[in-house]
Amino acid sequence: MPVEIDIAKVARLARLGLSEEELAAYGAQLEDILEHAARVQALPTEGVAPTAHPLPMVNAHRSDEVEPTLDREEVLTQAPDHTDGFFRVPAFLEDA
Amino acid sequence: MNDLADLTIGEAGRALRSGETSSVELLEAVRRRAAMTEADLHAYLTIDVEGAEAAARRADEAFAKGEDRGSLQGIPIALKDNMVTRGVETTAASQILAGWLPPYDATAVTKLHEAGAVIVGKTNLDEFAMGSSTENSAYGVSRNPWDPERVPGGSSGGSAAAVAVGSAFAALGSDTGGSIRQPASLCGVVGMKPTYGLVSRYGLIAFASSLDQIGPITRNVEDAVAVLDGIAGHDPEDATSYRGAVPDFGSRLDHGVEDLRIGVVEELSGEGIEPAVAAAFRAMLERLETAGAEITELSLPSTAYALSAYYLIAPAECSANLARFDGVRFGLRMDGGETVEEMMAATRAAGFGPEVTRRILLGTYALSAGYYDAFYGQAQKVRTLVIEDFKQAYEQADVLVTPTSPTTAFTVGERANDPLAMYLSDICNIPSNLAGDPGISVPIGVDDSGLPIGFQVLAPALAEPLLFQVAKTVEDLAGFEARPRMASSEGAA
């Protein structure tokens, strides 16, 4: 079953700024891969529960105690940009 | 074979304890081997000269004082570069993390330090562990020590190549869909994926969190037990870490296979398997039968759909996990325009290579509104069916066996432009990742070109002692002693 993809929309959702040529190339490859992956739809799965995780697990809790965290200065040495102890990014609010 | 770099961990440990050698000498030996072979292999991305020397000296001082923390003390070990190391560059072979100095150690790394191991350096991989040949590294391909025209497999290709050639005594890899076992098979070494949750994933740069597992790559089965012993155990930093008692991994190593029921997975042992691989596999089955095992053919019908399910589940999880690489807190930032969103889109387009981009797109699509049920949701149901198939199989057999890889090492470039052909490299490995069960690859012979062939053993969750028992028997029966020519001084000259 052929699969059609709005590749520009997918790239936008994934925050990938790709060129027109790249979009076309990835779009074609994805359609091929998805055609193969779509084989999963051929298997009858009525009444089968999905598995998100291989082992039966319950939530992991710990007591609410303050523990040491990463050192702020050391973390900020790796940031592309920072100011006053915070990560700095281009504006994301209008009239910021 | 008189070079220290060719010893197993067991042999090196005995030499350390008898005073015949020191950790500093072992480190010098693997460094010499790296100096001889790295130009051809490119197994390493970073060699931590100072950190390793300090650790080797500490290990020697400990031995001098009679302190002994067990079989890894003083042993030079390499790490796949998707495990974070404090203050030592960690890139996951991606441009987006070029130059990154992590502010913490992965738990597996901390445990190796605590066991007195010496971390030699960080090995090459397919970018973010996505690939089966180590060709997807942003820093250049690694090559196979048995034939540098060929790939070492992947994604833990640098780790497997280093262990095979002797530039590390052992290495850690990570296995999301065969990424420890397949390169181990292609490089003629032992590679083991533990039960999901046995080894903490804290500090393992996440690819697909419900599938990822760290494990050992070593020269023999006994060494795999030693390394796994060093890194397994519950970790509060990983919410999916297994909380029960850690099995006694090596407790059944000398038990043989008499009266064990060994199941041959029909779907993964016939069609699509290269003739030389199939012949070596069948020959080993005969030897196991002679050794007293009961061999039965059985079917895992849903494995026909496992690869398709994997290539929906793994990209879906990867598209979520890799959202964190956005140019804000660490790594690359590109100047993309006025807004933060444009900056992120420009950074990610420039920082990710083609395979990672492809999988992020694939996963984003499979999770997007309107397609979720048909792709991701359906794949998760197929995952349930795979798990049920395994459960039924383990009622008829104690362990399951397949060839590790359908082929021996392929040439560099051969599958690079055909994603689907590359994905098929891991068809025998992927079902056990979906099930969360352990698996191991043991070298059993070579094909007509002298390239290694691996034999895969699979066992139920937490049955590592049984897995190692069968693997050790396979190893003994195979008597595989061959080493890559490059690992001898004449070969490398």
Image (cartoon, coloured by chain):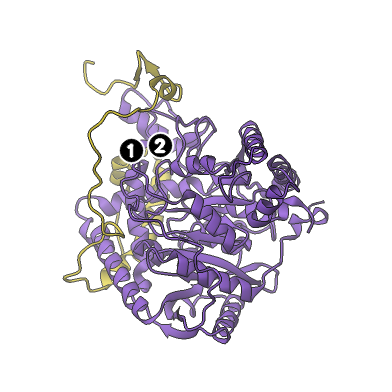
Chain colours: A yellow, B purple
Residue in the image at 36% along x and 55% along y:
B314
> Residue B212 in the image: x percent, y percent?
40, 53
Residue B429 appears in the picture as rendered: no
- Chain of the residue that carries numbered disc 2 in the rendered image: B
Residue B392: % across, % down = 32, 77
Q: Secondary structure at mark 1?
A: loop
> Whole-percent x and y of residue B31?
71, 42
Residue B161 occupies which quadrant of the picture? bottom right
Q: Are marks 1 and 2 in contact (CB under 8 Å)?
A: yes
User: Could you tell me if residue B148 is visible in this image?
Assistant: yes
User: Mark 2 = which residue?
Assistant: B348
Look at 33% across and 38% down and name the residue there: A15
User: From the viewer's perspective, is residue B450 above or below residue B275?
Assistant: above
Q: Callout 1 environment at 10 Å: few (<14), some (14 to 19), or many (20+)?
A: many
Quickly name the residue at label 1: A15
Q: Is residue A23 left or right of residue B226?
A: left
Q: Which residue is outermost to the left?
A: A47
Q: Is residue B260 left or right of residue B274?
A: left
In the depicted structure, whether residue B250 falls above or below residue B327 = below
Amino acid under disc 1:
Arg
Quadrant (top left, top right, bottom left, bottom right) of the N terminus of chain B = bottom right
Q: Pointer 1 indicates a residue of which chain?
A: A
**The one of B166 and A87 positioned closer to us in this rendering:** B166
Marks 1 & 2 on one chain: no
The x, y position of residue B424, in whole percent, is 47, 66
Relative side of B142 to B328, left or right: right
- Compared across the picture, whether B386 is left or right of B420 comes to left
Answer above or below: position of B158 versus B406: above
